[in-house]
Image (spheres, helix red, strand yellow):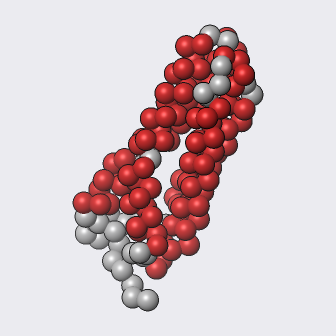
Amino acid sequence: MKKNNPRSGVLYSIYMLLNPLPFGFFVAGWIFDIFYNKTAEVLWAKAAAWCITFGLLFCIIPRFINLFYVWFRPVIEQRRSDVVGFWLYGFAIIAATFNAFIHSRDAFAIVPANIILSTLTILLIALHYLYQSTHIQNKLIGE
């Protein structure tokens, strides 16, 4: 297996631009789920459902780019952290998909599953970011 250079280019730029967006939407959905649990105001449940849906939509492109980088163009030094991050984020997407289905229920029937799945989604993505930040030697392009 030949050693590839650190990632750069248009695909990597798109990945770095779009990758944080789903996490922000999932955190917003989690916060709205907590508000809904405390107030029982339907607005918060609808807002959480929309945030989770947008998070799932915005994670499609970065995940396909990550799929390409992890399995078809691996950087040898980053291989292990990329694979672990790939699976953590993949399980987070599965949890978020189930959470989107939970949010299709009526009124207070979504509690407590919505908070549990939102928390699981956020924890898995946060673990992904923490693991990658501690196991990848980040170098600027051109170094």
Furthest-right residue in this view: 112
Q: Position of residue 31 (x, y in %)?
A: 59, 26
Is 24 left, or right, of 142 in this rendering?
right
Query: Which residue is drawn at the image coordinates 56% and 55% (left, top)?
Result: 90
Q: In which quarter of the image is residue 99?
A: top right
Is 88 left, or right, of 70 in this rendering?
right
Q: Nearer the viewer, residue 139 or 45?
A: 45
Identify whether 80 is placed above or below 21.
below
| Quadrant placement of the C terminus | bottom left
Furthest-bottom residue in this view: 1
Q: Can residue 110 be seen in this view?
A: yes
Q: Position of residue 98 (x, y in %)?
A: 63, 40
Identify whether 59 is placed above or below 63.
above
Is 126 left, or right, of 2 in this rendering?
right
Identify whether 75 is placed above or below 52.
below
Q: Quadrant of residue 7?
A: bottom left
Q: Nearer the viewer, residue 132 or 27?
A: 27
Query: Which residue is drawn at the image coordinates 30% and 53% (left, top)?
Result: 14
Query: Which residue is drawn at the image coordinates 72% and 22% (left, top)?
Result: 109
Report the label total.
0
| Quadrant placement of the N terminus | bottom left
Q: Where is residue 38 in the image (x, y as percent from the top left)?
A: 70, 15
Query: Which residue is drawn at the image coordinates 53% and 61% (left, top)?
Result: 86
Q: Where is residue 110 in the image (x, y as percent from the top left)?
A: 69, 25
Q: Quadrant of residue 115?
A: top right
Is 117 left, or right, of 89 in this rendering?
right
Q: Which of 52 and 80 is in front in this view?
A: 52
Q: Is residue 28 visible?
A: no
Q: Nearer the viewer, residue 52 or 106?
A: 106
